[in-house]
Image: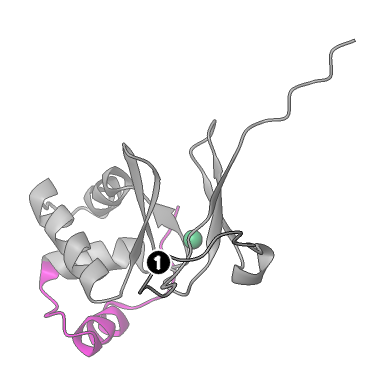
Amino acid sequence: MGYRSVTRDEISALLTEKGVFPTPQRLDVAQVILSRPQHLSAEQIIAGIRGMGSRVSKATVYNTLNLFCERGLVRTVEVDPSRQFYDSTIEPHHHFYNMETGELIDIPLDGVSLKLNTDLPVGTEQAGVDVVIRVRGAQPAAD
Ligand SMILES: [Zn+2]
Protein backbone atom coordinates (compact mmCIF):
# COMPACT_ATOMS: atom_id res chain seq x y z
CA MET A 1 0.00 0.00 0.00
CA GLY A 2 1.74 3.13 -1.17
CA TYR A 3 0.95 6.61 -0.04
CA ARG A 4 -0.07 8.83 -2.89
CA SER A 5 1.55 11.87 -4.29
CA VAL A 6 0.81 14.41 -1.57
CA THR A 7 4.26 15.85 -1.04
CA ARG A 8 5.84 16.60 2.29
CA ASP A 9 5.84 20.30 1.31
CA GLU A 10 2.11 20.27 0.57
CA ILE A 11 1.37 18.59 3.90
CA SER A 12 3.63 21.06 5.68
CA ALA A 13 1.77 23.98 4.07
CA LEU A 14 -1.59 22.47 5.06
CA LEU A 15 -0.52 22.12 8.71
CA THR A 16 0.80 25.67 8.79
CA GLU A 17 -2.42 26.96 7.25
CA LYS A 18 -4.35 25.29 10.10
CA GLY A 19 -2.04 26.76 12.72
CA VAL A 20 -0.15 23.53 13.43
CA PHE A 21 3.63 23.86 13.57
CA PRO A 22 4.96 21.14 11.23
CA THR A 23 7.38 19.13 13.37
CA PRO A 24 8.82 15.97 11.76
CA GLN A 25 6.56 13.77 13.92
CA ARG A 26 3.45 15.73 12.98
CA LEU A 27 4.41 15.51 9.32
CA ASP A 28 4.73 11.73 9.68
CA VAL A 29 1.26 11.44 11.21
CA ALA A 30 -0.20 13.80 8.60
CA GLN A 31 1.44 11.93 5.74
CA VAL A 32 -0.22 8.68 6.80
CA ILE A 33 -3.73 9.95 7.58
CA LEU A 34 -4.09 12.91 5.19
CA SER A 35 -2.66 11.37 2.03
CA ARG A 36 -6.11 10.31 0.81
CA PRO A 37 -9.73 9.92 1.96
CA GLN A 38 -9.62 7.11 4.51
CA HIS A 39 -10.52 5.92 7.99
CA LEU A 40 -7.72 4.64 10.19
CA SER A 41 -7.46 3.63 13.83
CA ALA A 42 -4.60 5.08 15.88
CA GLU A 43 -2.95 1.64 15.76
CA GLN A 44 -3.10 1.61 11.96
CA ILE A 45 -1.61 5.11 11.85
CA ILE A 46 1.22 4.06 14.16
CA ALA A 47 1.86 1.01 11.97
CA GLY A 48 1.87 3.23 8.87
CA ILE A 49 4.43 5.60 10.38
CA ARG A 50 6.69 2.73 11.45
CA GLY A 51 6.25 1.28 7.96
CA MET A 52 7.77 4.49 6.57
CA GLY A 53 10.79 3.83 8.75
CA SER A 54 10.04 6.56 11.28
CA ARG A 55 10.16 6.04 15.00
CA VAL A 56 7.51 7.86 16.93
CA SER A 57 5.97 7.17 20.33
CA LYS A 58 2.33 6.21 20.72
CA ALA A 59 1.80 9.17 23.06
CA THR A 60 3.07 11.56 20.38
CA VAL A 61 0.75 10.03 17.80
CA TYR A 62 -2.28 10.32 20.11
CA ASN A 63 -1.40 13.91 21.06
CA THR A 64 -0.92 14.81 17.40
CA LEU A 65 -4.24 13.25 16.40
CA ASN A 66 -6.01 15.19 19.15
CA LEU A 67 -4.40 18.39 17.90
CA PHE A 68 -5.40 17.59 14.30
CA CYS A 69 -9.01 17.08 15.48
CA GLU A 70 -9.02 20.40 17.31
CA ARG A 71 -7.72 22.18 14.22
CA GLY A 72 -10.18 20.53 11.85
CA LEU A 73 -7.65 18.45 9.92
CA VAL A 74 -9.29 15.13 10.80
CA ARG A 75 -12.42 14.07 12.60
CA THR A 76 -13.18 11.07 14.73
CA VAL A 77 -15.79 8.43 14.04
CA GLU A 78 -16.78 6.33 17.03
CA VAL A 79 -18.35 3.04 16.08
CA ASP A 80 -18.54 1.76 19.64
CA PRO A 81 -16.92 2.87 22.89
CA SER A 82 -13.84 0.74 22.23
CA ARG A 83 -13.30 1.54 18.55
CA GLN A 84 -12.50 5.01 17.29
CA PHE A 85 -11.37 5.87 13.79
CA TYR A 86 -9.78 9.00 12.38
CA ASP A 87 -11.37 10.24 9.17
CA SER A 88 -9.43 12.43 6.73
CA THR A 89 -12.69 13.64 5.17
CA ILE A 90 -13.88 16.44 7.42
CA GLU A 91 -16.96 17.51 5.44
CA PRO A 92 -20.15 16.23 7.11
CA HIS A 93 -21.09 12.72 5.99
CA HIS A 94 -22.34 9.42 7.39
CA HIS A 95 -20.91 5.89 7.52
CA PHE A 96 -21.60 2.24 7.06
CA TYR A 97 -19.62 0.19 9.55
CA ASN A 98 -18.99 -3.43 8.66
CA MET A 99 -18.97 -5.21 12.02
CA GLU A 100 -17.20 -8.24 10.57
CA THR A 101 -14.38 -6.58 8.67
CA GLY A 102 -14.09 -3.39 10.75
CA GLU A 103 -14.33 -1.33 7.55
CA LEU A 104 -15.94 2.11 7.48
CA ILE A 105 -17.53 3.21 4.20
CA ASP A 106 -18.64 6.79 3.55
CA ILE A 107 -22.28 7.67 2.92
CA PRO A 108 -22.82 11.10 1.35
CA LEU A 109 -24.66 13.57 3.56
CA ASP A 110 -27.80 13.37 1.38
CA GLY A 111 -27.69 9.56 1.48
CA VAL A 112 -29.43 9.60 4.84
CA SER A 113 -32.60 11.49 5.62
CA LEU A 114 -33.54 11.72 9.23
CA LYS A 115 -37.03 12.56 10.35
CA LEU A 116 -37.02 13.70 13.94
CA ASN A 117 -40.39 13.00 15.54
CA THR A 118 -39.69 14.97 18.65
CA ASP A 119 -38.71 18.51 19.57
CA LEU A 120 -35.14 19.46 20.34
CA PRO A 121 -34.50 20.18 24.01
CA VAL A 122 -35.70 23.67 24.96
CA GLY A 123 -33.16 26.35 24.18
CA THR A 124 -31.04 24.22 21.83
CA GLU A 125 -30.47 24.06 18.10
CA GLN A 126 -29.30 21.12 16.02
CA ALA A 127 -25.53 21.32 15.54
CA GLY A 128 -24.94 18.15 13.55
CA VAL A 129 -25.87 14.54 12.97
CA ASP A 130 -23.50 11.61 12.52
CA VAL A 131 -25.13 8.36 11.52
CA VAL A 132 -23.28 5.03 11.66
CA ILE A 133 -25.22 2.19 10.07
CA ARG A 134 -23.85 -1.18 11.21
CA VAL A 135 -23.85 -3.92 8.58
CA ARG A 136 -22.73 -7.54 8.41
CA GLY A 137 -22.62 -10.22 5.76
CA ALA A 138 -26.11 -11.26 4.72
CA GLN A 139 -27.10 -14.62 6.22
CA PRO A 140 -27.90 -17.28 3.62
CA ALA A 141 -31.61 -18.05 3.52
CA ALA A 142 -32.53 -21.27 5.32
CA ASP A 143 -34.09 -24.01 3.17
ZN1 LIG B 1 -15.81 9.00 6.47
Is residue 3 rendered magenta in the image? yes
Is residue 140 rendered magenta in the image? no
Q: Is residue 85 above or below residue 35?
A: above
Judged from this view, the residue extending furthest toward the top is 143
How far from the left and from the top, in percent, is residue 21? 11, 80
- Kindly indicate the quadrant of the structure image that contains residue 90: bottom left
How far from the left and from the top, in percent, is residue 69? 26, 67
Give the colour scheme shown. Answer: one colour
Tell me the residue at 37%/73% (across/down). Answer: 124
How far from the left and from the top, in percent, is residue 125? 41, 75
Judged from this view, the residue extending furthest toward the right is 143
Q: Is residue 35 above or below residue 58?
A: below
Q: Residue 52 or 133: which is nearer the viewer? A: 133
Q: Which residue has dot 1 on it?
A: 88
Tell me the residue at 41%/73% (across/down). Answer: 127
Q: Residue 131 or 126: which is nearer the viewer? A: 126
How far from the left and from the top, in percent, is residue 88? 40, 66
How many numbered circles does the render carry?
A: 1
Q: What residue range appears in magenta?
A: 1-24
Dot 1, crowdedness within 10 Å: few (<14), some or many (≥20)?
many
Helix, strand or loop for disc 1: loop
Tell me the residue at 54%/30% (across/down). Answer: 100
Q: Amino acid at mark 1?
A: Ser
